[in-house]
Image (cartoon, helix red, strand yellow):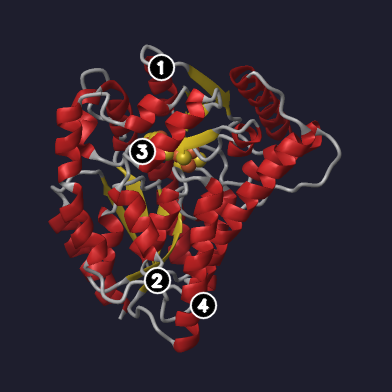
Amino acid sequence: MDLERHDELLEALPEVYEEIFLSQRSRPEAMEYFDEVVADIHGGRIRELYELSKKGKPVVGTFCIYVPEEIVLAVGGACVGLCGGSDSTIPDAEEYLPRDLCPLIKSSFGFLVSRLCPYCLVADVIVGENTCDGKKKMYELMREFKDVHVVELPQVKDERGLEYWFEQVVRFKEFVEELAGEEVTFESLREAIEKVNAKREALRELYELRRHDPAPISGRDANLVAQIAFYDDVERFTERVQELNEELRTRVEEGEGLEGPRILVSGTPMPIPHWKLLYIVEDCGGVVVCEESCTGTRYFEREVSTEGDTVEDLLRNIAEAYMEANCAIFTPNEERVKDIIRKFDEWSCDGVILYNLKFCQPYAVEHAKIERRLREEGIPVLRLESDYGKEDVGQLRTRVEAFLESLA
Ligand code: BJ8
């Protein structure tokens, strides 16, 4: 690990965090736990994962919500999200990867090769997935630095696609069993499904509380919680989100919260510390009330059924539930636009921001169509493209301000 560079990298975090999160007025007290997680982001959790790995339990690094965490949990292991959200490691990645590539891919790869991310280092293995072309090819290069297993996703969500995906889930279970040196049993898998379902339910409830007007929590705080879901211990995290929800229910009863144009943000994931867009929207007077993204609702909306009598039944339930996530790598992906329209209504939104990371072709192409469909429905929409840098902050701010004014 490059400790000197690592410390330099973390040095900037408190100031940014103060500006984006701690300076907000009347934050829920229960956010303190999540602040501590970020303050100690390369500390306590890393020690826990290291201990787990020492005991022979697999620590699995992932880059996509399609990797079934229940299976890893069923053998006592843990999944950690390794998606990079910082531009600090992009120059490292550009020694291997083309410049015109999605920043999420470059940042993630950069963290691995620069040895700056202790999560990458503590992970026993990386589990990638065949989704977009950039990620697919990145996993080939990652093999030079770490053991990599890839799960293959179908491109079409039909019966054949589901069957193909089910076979991949079975193959992943066998891979995890070999890694852990123990079998996934019906009981261990059902228990793991129940734990992850509880985590997802707590997150669902958090997002449902955001339907209220005024919103009992800011978009950036709620999204921070969703981002932390990819790192933290599942049970502890669930309890802390439930505590937060309890506090938010009181706020709703007392009519306490944030007012302003209510915005649904939809698009590519926003991994830690990519907080730029939500901060800009809220700093300009809007309130982000929902994120249709993989660091938002796509991660937790589905619940895996525990019906069945065999491990195979549970694996089928996992395959079916995971197939519901509407990623732009699927074609066609009609359910996503319906989902956005439904969320616009259910969260009483005033406008939609379609957001995509630069060079992300699946989302950029899909957004052209979605924008048209939303306009046909009379839904105000703003399309934005950005990366992890600061260079476009002024320009984004100008466009967001104009959009929010148009909603008034
Ligand atoms: S299920 S969204 S987490 S693939 S890396 S597609 S931004 S060009 S992350 Fe994703 Fe799974 Fe789909 Fe979700 Fe675009 Fe970048 Fe590719 Fe990306």
Query: Image quarter for residue 7?
Result: top left
**Does ligand 1 reach within 8 Å of label 3's beta carbon?**
yes
Is any atom of residue 86 visible in this view? yes
Q: Look at label 2 and name its amino acid.
A: Ile
> Which residue is at a point 56% across and 32% down the rendered structure image?
77
Spatial separation of the CA atoms under disc 2 and disc 4: 11 Å
Residue 155, given in percent of the width and then of the height, sits at 58, 32
Label 2 crowd (10 A; few <14 / some 14-19 / many >=20): many
- Whole-number angstrom distance, CA of label 4 to CA of label 3: 37 Å
| Pointer 1 residue | 146
Of badges 2 and 4, nearer the viewer stands 4
- The relative height of residue 312 versus residue 371 in the rendered view (above or below) is above
Dot 2 or dot 4: first in sequence order is 2
Viewer-closest of 182 and 170 = 182
Closer to the eye: label 3 or 1: 1
Between 193 and 402, the one lying in front of the other is: 193
Q: Which amino acid does label 4 sit on?
A: Arg
Q: Position of residue 244 (x, y in %)?
A: 47, 67
Residue 217's tag is 2
Q: Can residue 320 be seen in this view?
A: no
The answer to whether residue 228 is left or right of residue 129 is: left
**Quarter for ligand 1?**
top left
Q: Which of 393 and 342 is in front in this view?
A: 393
Q: Earlier in the sequence, mark 4 or mark 3?
A: 4
Indicate which label's residue lies in the foreground, 4 or 3.
4
The spot of residue 221 in percent (x, y) is 36, 62
Under circle 2, the secondary element is loop
Q: Mark 3 points at which residue?
A: 360
